[in-house]
Image (spheres, rainbow, N blue to C red):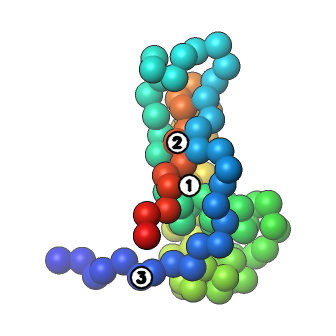
Amino acid sequence: MSRPKKQRCLQFTPCVFYYKPTGVPLRYLEEVEILPDEIEAVKLHFVDNLDQTKSAQKMCISQSTFARVVNTATKKIAFAIINGKAIRISKIVS
């Protein structure tokens, strides 16, 4: 049995929840799901230009956990772009 997932501090809520290739209706596309903590990690690291340590502190997680989260997110985004999939950003469930 694995440990329970530590609560992450998320401050960013995107205003758009889907990205897709143009010219193809969404109903014909497969989706790749990006979790709220993954989109927060991408924003902090790549948009806000924070290093992994500072980004991890903002999310209240360890640096190694942050590295895993941002790595998973970038792999999902790259996979979706290369393979023409839609990207769905999950909404935060309270």
Secondary structure at numbered mark 1: helix
What residue sits right under mark 1 in the picture? Answer: 73
- Quarter of image, res 62: bottom right
What residue sits right under mark 2 in the picture? Answer: 88
Residue 36: percent from left, percent from top: 53, 61
What type is the residue that disc 1 sits on?
Ala
Mark number, residue 57: none
Mark number, residue 6: 3
Residue 50: percent from left, percent from top: 78, 74
Secondary structure at numbered mark 3: loop
Is residue 36 something one can see in this rendering? yes
Mark 2, other Cα within 10 Å: few <14 / some 14–19 / many ≥20: some
Residue 78 placement, left or right of 31: right
Front position among marks 1 and 2: 2
What type is the residue that disc 2 sits on?
Arg
Point out the residue furthest to the left here.
1
Residue 68: percent from left, percent from top: 52, 67
Mark 1, other Cα within 10 Å: few <14 / some 14–19 / many ≥20: many
Is residue 75 something one can see in this rendering? no
Q: CA distance from mark 3 to mark 2?
A: 23 Å
- Quarter of image, res 60: bottom right
Give yes or no for contact between labels 1 and 2 (Cβ–Cβ under 8 Å).
no
Residue 44 placement, left or right of 76: right
Q: Nearer the viewer, residue 14 or 21?
A: 14
